[in-house]
């Protein structure tokens, strides 16, 4: 591993390690990585349409439908028509979903804090900028 290693290869490796650590931390919730991702994106407790949630979570609509079905079956989220636009379906956390999302957010924060603890704030901000640019491309 050197400075010439592709950034995307490093990102992929970091993603796998992060998913492993999060899986271990959140094992008792019985969630898949995709379900954890959706809960993390709903942790602010703001309802979102399916399309808004898909964009935020980086999940294709066909994949997201199955994830939402499983989370609804577990009693963690509910779907309802969006007020003012009955054609749009809004996704919101149930009380149990809010508890699980809070645990997910706490685990994300802990893993991130540990990973960047020895880095200067400027390096963390630069990493955030690079990841934001990659997500937008």
Image: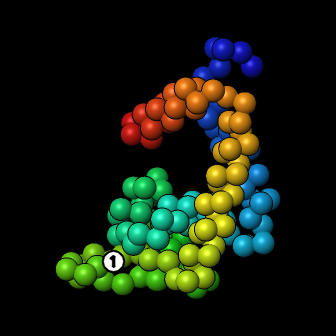
Q: Which residue is at 58% across, 26% downward?
A: 123
Q: Residue furthest left?
A: 84
- Where is residue 100? Give x, y as percent: 63, 73
Residue 73 in sight from this viewpoint: no
Depicted 100 relative to depicted 110: above or below = below
Q: Which residue is at 39% across, 55% downward?
A: 55
Residue nearest the observer in this picture, 68 or 97: 97
Residue 112 in sight from this viewpoint: yes
The image shows a total of numbered marks equal to 1
- Where is residue 133? Give x, y as percent: 42, 34
Q: Residue furthest front?
A: 121
- Where is residue 63? Give x, y as percent: 49, 64
Residue 41 shown left or right of residue 88 in the figure: right
Q: Which residue is mark 1?
A: 89
Depicted 14 relative to depicted 31: above or below = above
Q: Callout 1: 10 Å neighbours few (<14), some, many (20+)?
A: some
Residue 93 shown left or right of residue 15 in the figure: left
Q: Secondary structure at mark 1?
A: strand
- Where is residue 14? Give x, y as percent: 68, 38
Q: Which residue is at 37% across, 69% downward?
A: 48
Q: Which residue is at 73% across, 72% downward?
A: 30
Depicted 34 relative to depicted 90: above or below = above
Could you tell me which quadrant the N terminus lies in?
A: top right
Depicted 3 relative to depicted 127: above or below = above
Rendered image coloring scheme: rainbow
């Amino acid at each position: 591993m050197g400075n010439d290693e592709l950034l995307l290869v490093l990102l992929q490796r970091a993603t796998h390690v992060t998913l492993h650590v999060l899986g271990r931390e959140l094992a008792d919730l019985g969630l898949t990585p995709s379900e954890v991702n959706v809960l993390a994106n709903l942790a602010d407790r703001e309802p979102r349409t399916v399309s808004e949630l898909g964009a935020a979570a980086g999940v294709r609509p066909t994949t997201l439908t199955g994830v939402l079905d499983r989370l609804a079956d577990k009693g963690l989220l509910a779907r309802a028509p969006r007020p003012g636009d009955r054609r749009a379906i809004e996704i919101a956390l149930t009380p149990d979903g809010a508890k699980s999302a809070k645990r997910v957010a706490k685990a994300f924060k802990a893993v991130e804090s540990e990973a960047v603890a020895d880095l200067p704030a400027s390096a963390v901000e630069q990493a955030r900028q690079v990841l934001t640019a990659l997500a937008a491309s």
